[in-house]
Amino acid sequence: MKSDNILILVSTPLHLLGALILAKTTFKAQTCVLILIDQKDSRYYDALRASAQKSPFDAIYMTGIKPVGLFARLRNKRRNRDRLRAIIEKHPPRSVITGNDRKIEFDYAIHLARTYESDVTGGYLDDGLHSYIPQKLHWYQYTLFDTLLQKLFLGRKSPVPRLIGTCAAVQEAFLFRPDLAHEALHAKRLHRLDTEALSRSPLRELLRSMADRFTAKAQHYPTDATLLILPHPSVKRKIPGYTRIIDTLFALSGPLLLKRHPRDSEGAEATRCQKKRDCHLLPSDVAMELLLFSLQPRKVYSIRSSALLTLSWLMPGSAIYNIRTDAEYDTLFARFGIDNIAIGEIT
């Protein structure tokens, strides 16, 4: 029989992958309760529920779908508070782990859990780029509005960490590359996530079924294709020689898989892909972290995209390239073993 309840709050696909690893490895002897928060729809919740027999989680919940509009979001936050209270009453946790310790739901979960057990611990689950590079914030971020949320949600104020993963409630961090974590995180107990667990049964089958659910064409994508991941549209416009880079990649022989950023609505590359023989357009609104479980690309190219970091963790040993356009990005990617190449080296 499993012992202790472990609550894991996730809001992104990368958090979900980390949570799957924890439930299957570090906390396999504990009761793992997954709570999806801040979701724009129920796709991940529905996919997990549909494959529950392959899931390592003992229970799966989701808070209210994130609405549009300030007041609607505030009302939703209050409803989420009640939902979390009911979950924690049912599963009083020994530990609460989050992919974002700035989320008010984490603060509330820790606060409520400690009414059942005073020494409940907090954990941080890798959120990606900002686990490794301290985020540069404007003075007004995570200040006035967050204080208002704290009062409405908790009836009290609680400090919001300026650096992700560093709030006082977090004692340990579960990272893909703890050796490269930013300095502030080294004040926590660091643990490495076992990414190989994702390629073993039953997680491999779970993730494959989820990826197939998100795109009906998954089984038709060629296995020897070149994968091109486009950066955020605001980044694209700042890249010198961007058009020439895209021309070079589209001129490569063999099939091409094109993945746009979820916020990229400009569509120029997508239109070009639709007109090109052997170019396959991947759904832009599905996270690359999940799509890759239905793909077997021969090479991966991108320009200043943080998705390359994720792929370097989840596809170790694969041919992953950042096209050199910026020294700061080149240095970052090199730290993670990603090759930086010039446009003339694309093959």
Image: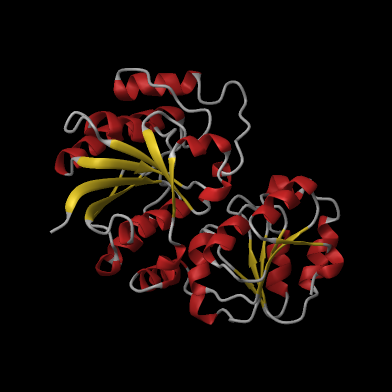
Name which quarter of the figure residue 121 lies in: top left
Left or right: residue 127 compared with residue 85:
right
Q: Is residue 85 left or right of residue 207?
A: left
Q: Residue at x 28, y 62 (%)?
A: 56
| Res 22 → quadrant | bottom left
Coordinates of residue 142 in the picture (x, y in percent): 51, 25
Residue farthest to the left?
Answer: 1
- Residue 217 in view: no
Residue 190 position, x and y percent, is: 44, 45
Look at the image and name its color scheme.
secondary structure
At x 52%, y 64%, the residue is 314
Q: Seen in the image, is 289 located left or right of residue 2?
A: right
Report x, y in % for residue 263: 60, 49
Q: Is residue 59 rendered to the left or right of residue 241?
A: left
Q: Quadrant of the C terminus?
A: bottom right
Residue 26 appears in the figure? yes
Residue occupying the point 37% across, 41% down: 123
Which residue is drawn at the image coordinates 63% and 56% (left, top)? 336
Viewer-proximal residue, 212 or 87? Answer: 87
**Residue 19: where, in percent of width, then height?**
37, 54
Compared with 345, 119 (above or below) is above
> Quarter holding the N terminus?
bottom left
